[in-house]
Image: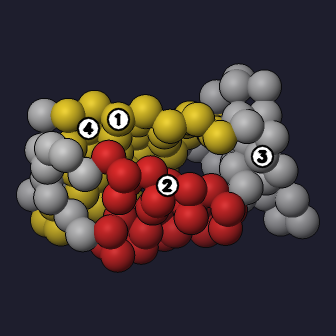
Amino acid sequence: METLTFRFEHGQRRLKAAPELVGVVSSGNLEVLIENAPLNGACAIEVKTAARGFGTIWEAVMTDFQQRWQLADTRISINDMGATPAVVSLRLDQAVEAMVEEGA
């Protein structure tokens, strides 16, 4: 397993809901947990993946995700067993859509 961490500063949107779990490792090869966290406006992402050596691709997917959502005070934990970048983006978007504050 490889662990990758990303941190994005100065987010604009905050979560409104309790932690959200989306996807299941045994179905779709991906699990995502998104929760509120006091991070001084940042979004922290930790990825645990079985696919070693894909850090650059993960960074691109996470950067694209944060540019779309601009999350603040958010912690995201991802357990990956080889999901494609498209599946990762879809699962992240599914989790966040129900959780961001309206008008934020």
Residue on which the image places disc 2: 62
N-terminal label among 2 and 3: 3
- Percent x, y of residue 27: 14, 65
> For the residue marked with disc 4, what is the amino acid?
Lys
Residue on which the image places disc 1: 4
The residues bearing labels 2 and 3 have C-alpha atoms spaced at a distance of 14 Å
The residues bearing labels 1 and 3 have C-alpha atoms spaced at a distance of 20 Å
> For the residue marked with disc 3, what is the amino acid?
Gly
> For the residue marked with disc 1, what is the amino acid?
Leu
N-terminal label among 1 and 2: 1
The residue lying toward the viewer, choosing from 32 and 55, is 55
Residue on which the image places disc 4: 48
- Percent x, y of residue 26: 9, 57
Residue 63 vertical position relative to residue 47 in the rendered view, above or below: below
> For the residue marked with disc 2, what is the amino acid?
Met
Quick check: can you spot residue 21? no
